[in-house]
């Protein structure tokens, strides 16, 4: 009962009712409804009875109307009032009876509902007690079963332990027998191993002797093969040296021819000048007079052009190596001087290493250092000495690339003049469509070289112009197409992408083109030329270098550092603004001029 009250209290807090409460309410509602119905029935019965009584009285009054004529009207009214009162009393009694009957029925229904709710509560309680008893009995049975299981396991464990003990004793005895047998077998095996080891050592000794004999035979064979390879290499070197000598002779012949032509042109110019001066009555220079900076003396001119680079290095060497012993400190000082002259770490180490082999701990002069420097520079640059050689395919496409202000346009014009002087038919494409001055500059050089110049509108697509230029060069049978490009910084990705597009257009027209992709570098930028070379080599497939403005900088040694790192052919160097100031590169001449040996020879 207490639990039922708790349950009711819990449900009432949330506005809910239990099943028993709901049944009691339903029973009370039914009783109230029955009571209402009974009251209505009682009222109807009373009305019916009153109507019947009234009808009967009216009929009696009609029948006995003749008999009661003598009764006075007052008595009749009294009688009617009495009848009416009796009828009302009877009706009230009927209503009271019906009401009483309804209340009794309602009370009986409420009692029945209450008894039914109590019976159900008792039944639920009995069921819960039965469940609790069953659970308790099940738990006790489970505990008894668990205890029996544990007891069985204990007994089984004891039996297993006993059996294991017996098995262990049996196994120990068996192991002892096996150990004795194994010991005997081990003794036999040890003797066998000793015999086998003795045989193996004897076999190793025999094999070593055989290997020695085979090694001697192989060494003899390799020596014979090496001797043959050395002889073949010697013969190949001789052939290469012969080819190199032939190439140098050809280059020297070309240079001699060009210098002869220059001397002839110079003589012609001088003759014309003398004639003009004589006609004007002025004093003409002496016949045959030349100076160190005349066009025919390339060594003098390049020495003059590299004077800024040479003088600074020579002054540093003279200050540091006047009768000085070449020790570790002196080598470090020399390396610093050479690296500061933009020669690069590799060439600087080669120079100091060469000097250290013969002059370490000996006095050394700056002239000896200059000679060693000239030798190293010549060794590095000589394999890269390569003039622009045209192939048989027409047109030969030459692409000129480089950053703004490097001298691309001027260099292209000078080379175009050289080609047209040699009788070549040249077409120039002004691929720098972003700079109006570039077209004007090329037009001047085109007039000098007697070469037509193709151009587009400012800001036009350079790749489209290049495509049209290749078509024209083919249609009009030009020998050479020289393409100028817009100057661009190597760190501007979008500009380098445009250059790559120009290259793709060229290759679509001719897979072997451009036949020469020439990077023009400004010597005044010093070490920055290394980054420019790396960037353009990736984008424009650079095949060779031309370095300009060597006459206006103290950083001419960067050409050595470039060559040592990238190993790119060097076509020409520029040491001035005039046409004759762009010369085919000569490694020995450059080495002598840059190292200062040429100045020492003149002195």
Image (cartoon, rainbow, N blue to C red):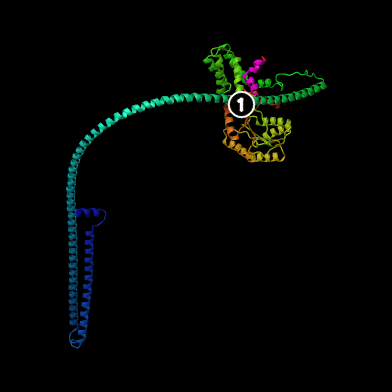
Specify whether residue 149 is painted magenta.
no
**Relative to 274, is 445 on the left or the right?**
left
Q: Position of residue 42 (x, y in %)?
A: 21, 73
Q: Which structural element holds mark 1?
A: helix
Please identify the quarter of the rendering in which residue 369 is found.
top right
Residue occupying the point 57% across, 31% down: 534
**Relative to 91, is 234 on the left or the right?**
right
Confirm whether residue 97 shows in the render: yes
Q: Position of residue 525 (x, y in %)?
A: 60, 26
Q: Which residue is mark 1?
A: 236
Residue 543 vs residue 522, the one in the foreground: 543
Residue 413, placed above or below residue 96: above
Residue 114, placed above or below residue 213: below
Quarter of the image with the N terminus is bottom left
Residue occupying the point 30% across, 29% down: 188
Specify whether residue 600 is painted magenta.
yes
């Amino acid at each position: 009962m207490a639990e039922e009250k708790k349950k009711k209290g819990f449900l009432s807090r949330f506005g809910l009712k239990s099943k028993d409460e709901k049944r009691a309410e339903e029973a009370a509602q039914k009783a109230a409804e029955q009571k209402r119905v009974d009251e209505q029935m009682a009222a109807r019965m009373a009305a019916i009875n009153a109507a019947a009584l009234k009808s009967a009285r009216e009929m009696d009054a009609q029948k006995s109307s003749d008999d009661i004529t003598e009764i006075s009207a007052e008595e009749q009214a009294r009688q009617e009032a009495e009848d009416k009162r009796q009828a009302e009393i009877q009706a009230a009694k009927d209503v009271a009876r019906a009401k009483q009957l309804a209340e009794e029925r309602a009370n009986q229904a409420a009692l029945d509902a209450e008894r039914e709710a109590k019976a159900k509560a008792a039944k639920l309680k009995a069921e819960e007690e039965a469940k609790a008893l069953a659970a308790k009995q099940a738990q006790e049975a489970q505990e008894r079963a668990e205890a029996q299981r544990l007891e069985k396991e204990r007994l089984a464990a004891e039996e297993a332990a006993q059996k294991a003990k017996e098995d262990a004793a049996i196994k120990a005895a068996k192991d002892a027998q096996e150990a004795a047998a194994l010991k005997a077998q081990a003794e036999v095996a040890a003797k066998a191993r000793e015999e086998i080891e003795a045989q193996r050592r004897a076999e190793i000794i025999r094999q070593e002797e055989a290997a020695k004999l085979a090694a001697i035979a192989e060494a003899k064979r390799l020596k014979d093969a090496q001797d043959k390879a050395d002889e073949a290499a010697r013969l190949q070197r001789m052939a290469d040296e012969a080819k190199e000598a032939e190439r140098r002779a050809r280059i020297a012949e070309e240079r001699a021819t060009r210098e002869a032509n220059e001397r002839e042109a110079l003589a012609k110019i001088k003759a014309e000048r003398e004639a003009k001066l004589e006609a004007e009555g002025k004093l003409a220079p002496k016949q045959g007079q030349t100076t160190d900076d005349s066009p025919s003396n390339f060594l003098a001119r390049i020495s003059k052009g590299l004077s800024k680079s040479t003088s600074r290095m020579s002054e540093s060497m003279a200050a540091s190596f006047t009768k000085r012993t070449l020790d570790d400190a002196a080598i470090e000082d020399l390396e610093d001087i050479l690296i500061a002259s933009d020669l690069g770490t590799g060439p600087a180490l080669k120079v100091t290493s060469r000097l250290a082999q013969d002059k370490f701990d000996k006095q050394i002069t700056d002239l000896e250092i200059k000679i060693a420097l000239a030798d190293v520079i010549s060794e590095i640059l000589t394999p890269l000495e390569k003039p622009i050689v045209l192939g048989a395919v027409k047109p030969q496409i030459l692409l000129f690339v480089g950053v703004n202000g490097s001298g691309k346009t001027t260099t292209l014009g000078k080379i175009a003049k050289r080609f047209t002087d040699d009788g070549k038919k040249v077409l120039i494409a002004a691929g720098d469509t972003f700079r109006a001055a570039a077209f004007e500059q090329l037009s001047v050089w085109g007039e000098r070289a007697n070469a037509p110049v193709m151009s587009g509108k400012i800001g036009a697509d350079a790749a489209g112009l290049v495509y049209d230029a290749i078509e024209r060069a083919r249609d009009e049978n030009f020998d050479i197409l020289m393409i100028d490009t817009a100057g661009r910084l190597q760190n501007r990705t979008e500009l380098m992408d445009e250059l790559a597009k120009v290259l793709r257009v060229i290759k679509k027209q001719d897979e072997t083109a451009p036949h020469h992709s020439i990077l023009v570098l400004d010597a005044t930028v010093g070490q920055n030329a290394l980054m420019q070379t790396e960037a353009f080599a990736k984008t424009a497939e650079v095949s060779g270098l031309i370095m300009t403005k060597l006459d206006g900088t103290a950083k001419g040694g960067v050409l050595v550092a470039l060559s040592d790192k990238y190993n790119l052919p060097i076509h020409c160097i520029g040491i001035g603004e005039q046409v004759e100031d762009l010369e085919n590169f000569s490694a020995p001449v450059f080495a002598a001029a840059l190292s200062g040996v040429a100045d020492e020879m003149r002195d």
